[in-house]
Amino acid sequence: MYTGLLDTPSFREILTKCGWNFVGVNVGMLLKISESPALSKEEHPELLDISTATSENDHTFFNDITSEAFDIPKIAQSTWKQVNIDVGKDKKCVHLLGSPSGHKDPVTALTMIYTSDGSSYLYNVSTLAKHRKKGYSSALLRHAVRLASKAGCTSMTLCADPKAVNIYSKLGFKPYSELPLYLYGVEFEAVAEKCCVNACEK
């Protein structure tokens, strides 16, 4: 959960008492699409083959990539996958997958949502650990910016991990806010597994 301007010491104390744990601060970033270098920079098609997730197999790849990147507990992965499948049914949403040239399986992914006011939003930007720092995520992001431009969008926003701000800045994104992040129950996986074991034993 992001708290934004609500994140005061007293509010944080209330959240902590209710089981929410502060895990860090992400950066809200905004892109004016017409000013993005992604629209003028020549793409190298040999770097990445890009497709839209539509089949069950596609969604399995999408789930595997994003689950690894965001440390989704195994017990929650089936729910995570179904949520993304359901979100993808909306015509204003697209899940993109990128496969390196000559590589059969996708290694990078993201989700883009178009809104009715001419803006777009990116999330789930992720790459499998062993394929990072090769430019794959950046190539997929450039593709997403071009798609948004063709769809008539004028702006794009996202929430970035502080470590990834430089990547987005190169595409023209600019920080506009800090977003305190809270997760509910840091021991979720252990507790959930214990509950499942207890349920099975009964």
Image (spheres, rainbow, N blue to C red):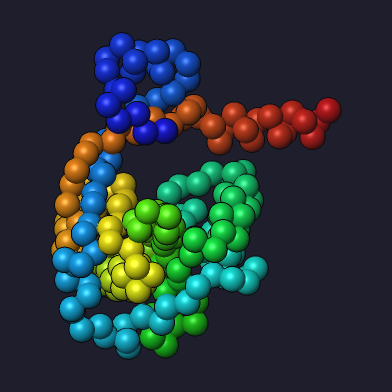
Residue 167 seen from this side: no
Q: Position of residue 30 (x, y in %)?
A: 23, 52
Q: How many marks?
A: 0
Decide: is 2 above or below 49.
above
- Residue sitting at x 37%, y 53%: 117
Q: Quadrant of residue 53?
A: bottom right
**Horizontal side, residue 122 vs residue 189: left or right:** left
Q: Position of residue 29 (x, y in %)?
A: 24, 49
Decide: is 9 above or below 33.
above
- Residue sitting at x 40%, y 13%: 14
**Horizontal side, residue 139 vs residue 193: left or right:** left
Residue 31 seen from this side: yes
Q: Residue furthest front?
A: 117
Q: Quadrant of residue 4?
A: top left
Looking at the rendered image, the quarter that the N terminus falls into is top left
Looking at the rendered image, the quarter that the C terminus falls into is top right
Q: Nearer the viewer, residue 82 or 172?
A: 172
Q: Residue furthest right?
A: 202
Q: Nearer the viewer, residue 117 or 114?
A: 117
Q: Position of residue 28 (x, y in %)?
A: 26, 44
- Residue sitting at x 54%, y 63%: 91
- Residue sitting at x 22%, y 57%: 31
